[in-house]
Image (cartoon, rainbow, N blue to C red):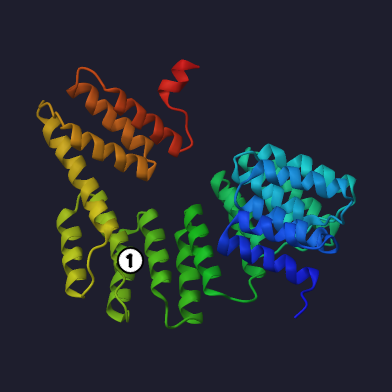
Amino acid sequence: MNKTVSDQAIHLDLIAKSRGIAAAEAYFMSLPESSKNHLTYGALLNCYCKDLMTEKAQALFEKMKELNLELSSMPYNSLMTLYLKNGLPQMVPPFIQEMKAGDIMPDTYTYNVWMRALAAVNDISGVERVIDEMKRDGRVAGDWTTYSNLASIYADAKLFDKAETALKELESKNACKEISAYQFLITLYGRTGNLLEVYRVWRSLKLAFPKTANISYLNMIQVLVNLNDLPGAEKCFREWSSGCSTYDIRVANVLIGAYLKEDSYKKADNLKYQSQKRGTKPNAKTWELFLDYYLKKEILNQLGDGGKWVPSNAVVEKLLQHFEDKKDVDGAEGFLEVLKKSKDELGSDVLESLIRIYAAAGKKSPIMRAAD
């Protein structure tokens, strides 16, 4: 069949996903000049943005403007998302201004990414101005993503009353009643600390979906644990365990982690045993939870009576790798204090590992700060 230019743009995107950017570029170059319009250029631009290829994306966008191609909000949305993912939210407002200057109509996605960029620099009043502008414009209606973003932004800023107002607006727009929407509401109400609303939405979820999925129980139990409602989490777990068709170790892991955190080792070990009786093997997360518990207990036991714990190099290496994988800066710093007490001098390998841990967590290490 003869592909339309729209077909070719879709084809290019699929090639990038299945064979990589180089193959997509080769396909683009093979297209006749008549097919190289805003659709195919836009598809290639989006591929660059998804792969976080900033220089290529920006260069291609400039070429699109030089060729006077028809520009919509889509290429701008792709570039703004790219810069946001690269930790450069300050690059988003100039694109918004460029769109306004070119009379390019923003869509819902434009407003959503603009909100996230302003939230990333803690400009909450700016986020509210975006919502007001969108409402005044009238051409774009706020959707589920808009108000879930707004609620999440308020929750991050600990503006819980405003977050709950946004959640009520969100619920009024949830016409489709998908299970993921209920789960998202439970998570966000949990972040505001409102246990009553968490249970209200949970009851609504179970009424709408009587055969409640494992993933919904996993989400609910995690929220209850985060809110320190351990009795509620245990009750929810028993309900799930008695009626589930497939025993999911991930659900058990949430409760195991909660037990270990409060030093209830016997409860955690018993739950692991009961899970095994149900025919489910502990997974890597299960063992990781117990490993964390044992390590903390061992260090406390060694140091509690004035003892001096001198870990072997192999143990040090494994622990540092563990902290790096988890991006656990606090754990690494605590372990560093233990090492300082047990070793006269820290090797360069330890310092290099610490720098990597900070980098993985997106933070600057004390070593680099001292260098600055």
Vertical arrangement, residue 360 with respect to residue 246, above or below: above
Amino acid type of the residue tagged 1 in the rendering: Val
Residue 271 visible somewhere in the drawing: yes
Q: In the image, is 25 to the left or to the right of 222?
A: right
Locate residue 365: give its quadrant: top left
Front-lying residue, 109 or 183:
109
Q: Position of residue 194 (x, y in %)?
A: 48, 57
Local packing at callout 1 (Cα closer than 10 Å; few below 14, some 14-19, many 20+) is: many
Identify the residue at image location x=19%, y=32%. Answer: 313
Identify the residue at image location x=17%, y=35%. Answer: 299
Locate residue 106: give its quadrant: bottom right
Q: Position of residue 52 (x, y in %)?
A: 61, 47
Q: Position of residue 135 (x, y in %)?
A: 80, 57
Task: Read off the residue under disc 1.
Answer: 251
Q: In the image, is 16 to the left or to the right of 232?
A: right
Front-lying residue, 172 or 176:
176
Residue 111 visible somewhere in the drawing: no
Q: In the image, is 178 to the left or to the right of 272?
A: right
